[in-house]
Image: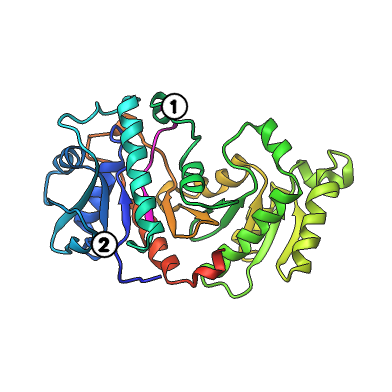
Amino acid sequence: MNTSLPLAVTMGDPSGIGPEIVAKTILHRTDVRRSVVIGDTAVMERAIASIGGGLHLNEIHDIADAKPDGALNILAASRTETPPALGKVSAASGRMAYDAIVAAIDLARTGKVAGIVTAPIHKEALAAAGLSYPGHTEILAEKGGAGRVAMMLANDDIRTVLVTIHCSLADAIRRADLPAQMSAIRLAHQGGCALGIARPRIAVAGLNPHAGEGGLFGDEEIRIIAPAIAAARAEGIDASGPWPGDTVFMQARNGRFDVVVAQYHDQGLIPVKYLGLERGVNITLGLPFVRTSPDHGTAFDIAGRGIADPGSLETAIDYARRLAKAPRDQEK
């Protein structure tokens, strides 16, 4: 990857804090001012006003025209005279957020940007716009030309990769089959390598309490998870487990493991988010390009007030730069 290229940063849902934290980050982080915001000019003008100004917009039509001179470089994916209302779900916001994501994916797939950093979107707004995607990950997988993808949530203490993502717990149990286990373990290994860990130690969490307690509390560990671990080890991956989900993250935080493979959404995300939303970042593994995002939502309750913390977005940008330097064949 050409790391001299700028990053594409999507504005997120126009009714949430995404545009505000994007503007704050570019205002205060002069080192990222060549980044190109993908979104709507009127929405970003409102965001800049909400933080007290300090930036002017540089609307561009080609990535090569991005300038690091105190401007917010914006490439329009949509145009509106009056931005959607703040703090409210709307079809207009869902469509505008989606259009920005698709435009950023096109830039990444054609090699015009070093990677994508996405500000938060709202799932109900996507649905209101008639877009049947549970979240960013599914849009990225479909439009990005990927097969299996996985979410890695990371902070300074722990990293976790999910076997299943946005679905009910009942569906997660059904979907956590052998192919899903193998994909998650492999992507966890590849993600760890991309972060500079020569031989990542992958801990695989069990699905059931106490990792099934030898079959007393469920046999998924015996039938599915343990065979997947054995197969991964045969491929040269340093995988172990299944470990009880209630203690494996503590062991990872204490340095025993580099990445934890969690079986379902909340099992993996609660430990990361408990340590602080401002420190967490979401990395999509399995794509042919880099993508990261903050580890929080749209925060409609504070949108437009100028008080949103851009810390997680800044962390996501830093991770994107780091991942852009990694050989891409590690993530295929």
Choose mark 2 or mark 1, whichever is in front: 1
Q: Using the image as rendered, state which of residue 221 and residue 65 is in the foreground.
A: 65
Q: What stretch is highlighted in magenta?
A: 116-124
Image position of 125 (left or right of 180): left
Q: Classify 10 Å Cα crowding around label 1: few (below 14), some (14-19), many (20 and above).
A: some
* Quadrant of the drawing holding the C terminus: bottom right
Real-space CA distance between mark 2 and mark 1, rounded to the nearest whole angstrom? 32 Å
Q: What element carries label 1?
A: helix
Residue 252 image-quadrant placement: bottom right
Q: Where is residue 69 in the image (x, y as percent from the top left)?
A: 13, 63
Q: Is residue 269 above or below residue 82?
A: below
Q: Is residue 141 above or below residue 235?
A: above
Q: Using the image as rendered, state which of residue 290 and residue 202 is in the foreground.
A: 290
Residue 275: image tag: none
The residue labelled by disc 1 is: 127
* Quadrant of the drawing holding the N terminus: bottom left
Q: Using the image as rendered, state which of residue 245 and residue 317 is in the foreground.
A: 317
The residue labelled by disc 2 is: 32
Circles 2 and 1, Cβ within 8 Å, touching? The answer is no
Query: Colour scheme in the image?
Result: rainbow
> Magenta stretch: residue 123 in it?
yes
Three-letter code for the amino acid on which mark 2 is drawn:
Val
Q: Earlier in the sequence, mark 2 or mark 1?
A: 2
Q: Position of residue 109 (x, y in %)?
A: 41, 57
Image position of 36 (left or right of 153): left
Residue 2 image-quadrant placement: bottom left
At 15% from the left and 31% from the top, the residue drawn is 81
Q: In this view, does 63 lie above or below 221?
A: below
Q: Is residue 289 above or below residue 94?
A: below
Residue 43 seen in the current view? yes
Q: Classify 10 Å Cα crowding around label 2: few (below 14), some (14-19), many (20 and above).
A: some
At 44% from the left and 32% from the top, the residue drawn is 123
